[in-house]
Image (cartoon, rainbow, N blue to C red):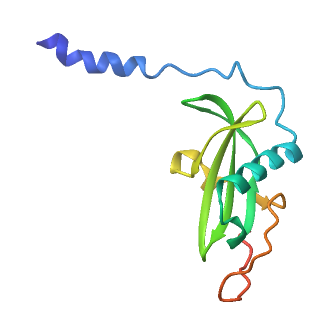
Amino acid sequence: MRATLFLPLTLLGCSGVALTQTDAPASAPNPAAFHKIIGDYLKELFKDIAAYESFEISDARWVHTVKGWSWLSCVRFQERGHVRTYAVFIQTDKVVDSRYAVTTDGCGEQTYAPFDDIPVTAKPSNGVELDPLH
């Protein structure tokens, strides 16, 4: 009986093994190429992208996910008056995962710059210009 009480504590100790960044690249990806990959991906993913406004992008960060080590960049934009944040994960010049950002992505703590790789010409349906997010 006592052994079963200590089993969860023993297993918790195993989960504290630190991950190493042995696969970390020597430097961050080329921003122009990285932005093009993300821009092309989002244009394909969001069919109504022309209706969105004020695209901004964060710098790439090296993170560990269930798919392994990846570069993560967050993209912020306005959709019908609502601020949205999207997380894009890249490995070897290819998007391997993406989603609307969740807290663990850390997108809320990032610094953003205008994302010009997504040229958007549409204006909001009410004709009012949106303020930039930055």
**Is 42 drawn above or below residue 134 in the view shown?**
above
| Nearer to the camera, 14 or 85 | 85
- The image quadrant that residue 6 belongs to is top left
The percent position of residue 115, horizontal first and vertical second, equals 80, 60
The picture places residue 87, in percent across and down from the top left corner, at: 63, 49
Q: Quadrant of the C terminus?
A: bottom right
The answer to whether 133 is drawn above or below residue 62 in the figure is below
> Can you give x and y, in whole percent of width and height, for residue 35 in the image?
81, 49
Say which residue appears at 58% left-offset and 46% top-offset: 105
Question: Where residue 124 sits in the image (x, y, percent)?
Answer: 68, 81
Q: Is residue 10 above or below residue 132?
A: above
Camera-nearest residue between 64 and 81: 81
Report the residue at 84% width, 61% height from top. 116
Q: Residue at x 78, y 35 (%)?
A: 93
Tally the marks.
Answer: 0
Using the rendered image of the protein, determine whether residue 52 is visible from the camera's viewpoint. Answer: no
Residue 67 sits in quarter: top right
Q: Which quarter of the picture shows residue 29?
A: top right
Above or below 68: residue 4: above
Residue name at image x 63 percent, y 20 percent: 20
Quadrant location, the N terminus: top left
Looking at the picture, tell me which residue is in the foreground, 5 or 45.
45
The answer to whether one can see residue 73 in this image is: yes
